[in-house]
Image: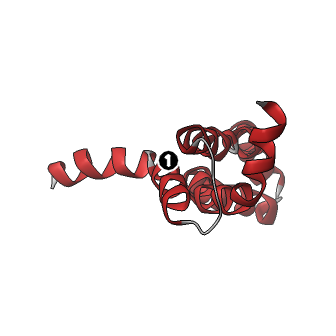
Amino acid sequence: MEYLAIIGVPLLLWLPLYVAALVAKFSHLEIPRKFLFCIVCLIIAYGTLGIVFPVVALLNLISSFLLYDWIKLGYKSLAGFFIYFEEISTYIVLTFPLIASFIVPAKLAPKWQGLVETYS
């Protein structure tokens, strides 16, 4: 079972690159500089962590420092939200780049030829 994790985790981490390569290879659009397209899609897909992670980190810090006081003061519904958020925050951070790995190439591919012509 460990071998599955050893093989599966790198494949999952490079998923944005694989999706961009499939879009570049099999797209009906003419995509110049396919390798650069794949790298840019990889960078943008993992750059979305910069959008999600500060919010998740802030909510985790709030829950770790204020949760006990809120329970003690009787704000159990507010504390319950943060307890639930602590459980799902890892899934949010992991799934956001995976979703972006499919959206970014699909949205970037039609505009890619104009971008390459503009900046080359």
Residue at point 44%, 45% (across, down): 13
Q: What secondary structure is marked by label 1? A: helix
State left or right for residue 52 relative to residue 21: right
Q: Nearer the viewer, residue 58 or 44?
A: 44
Q: Nearer the viewer, residue 32 or 75?
A: 32
**Could you tell me if residue 78 is visible in this image?**
yes
Whole-percent x, y for residue 2 in the image: 17, 49
> Count the marks: how many?
1
Whole-percent x, y for residue 32 in the image: 63, 46
Residue at point 70%, 45% (across, down): 48
Q: Quadrant of the C terminus?
A: top right
**Furthest residue in direction bottom, as rendered:** 28
**Could you tell me if residue 72 is visible in this image?**
no
**Furthest residue in direction top, as rendered:** 120
Q: Nearer the viewer, residue 26 or 87?
A: 26
State left or right for residue 117 relative to residue 14: right
Q: Nearer the viewer, residue 47 or 120?
A: 120
- The amino acid pointed to by label 1 is Leu
The residue wearing badge 1 is 17
Where on the picture, by quarter, is residue 56?
A: top right
Whole-percent x, y for residue 43 in the image: 62, 38
* Mark 1 neighbour density, 10 Å: few (under 14) some (14–19) many (20 or more): many
